[in-house]
Amino acid sequence: MAEESQSLRSLFDEAERLRSTLDTFPNSNSSTFQEALAKSIERYERCAQAANHVSLFSPNESAEDVATGDLPLVSSCGHVKSLLRILS
């Protein structure tokens, strides 16, 4: 689980890095922006799927039960939704 958690953390960090670069593009219609946007969405989706696969967050847990280091991973689905709004 530690190895899966680490790769999940790396994937999330990469998604965050890609999302933060979106503000640097002068044109959201450019192919490079669209490519970075798609990659960011894909990484966040993979994070959410991996978190579900390893049962990182249980429906039986309260917010206090989630490890502090895992809290940013909770936002993966929210980031996907906000990035998808840019596409529409």
Image: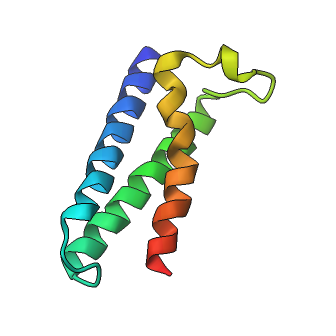
Which color scheme does this rendered protein use?
rainbow
**In the rendered image, which quarter is residue 54 located in?**
top right
Q: Nearer the viewer, residue 53 or 77?
A: 77
Q: Residue at x 49, y 53 (%)?
A: 79
**In the rendered image, which quarter is residue 11 located in?**
top left
In the displayed structure, would residue 40 be above or below residue 66?
Answer: below
Estimate the x, y position of residue 44 in percent, counting from the top left. Answer: 45, 50
* Left or right of 59, for residue 7: left
Q: Nearer the viewer, residue 55 or 19?
A: 19
* Left or right of 48, for residue 28: left
Estimate the x, y position of residue 1 in percent, counting from the top left. Answer: 49, 18
Q: Residue at x 44, y 73 (%)?
A: 86
Q: Residue furthest right?
A: 60
Estimate the x, y position of residue 69 in percent, counting from the top left. Answer: 46, 20
Estimate the x, y position of residue 53 in percent, counting from the top left. Answer: 60, 36
Q: Nearer the viewer, residue 34 or 47?
A: 34
* Left or right of 65, for residue 29: left
Q: Nearer the viewer, residue 38 or 75?
A: 75
Q: Residue at x 37, y 24 (%)?
A: 6
Q: Residue at x 22, y 82 (%)?
A: 30
In the displayed structure, would residue 78 be above or below residue 83?
Answer: above
In the displayed structure, would residue 40 be above or below residue 25?
Answer: above
Q: Residue furthest bottom?
A: 29
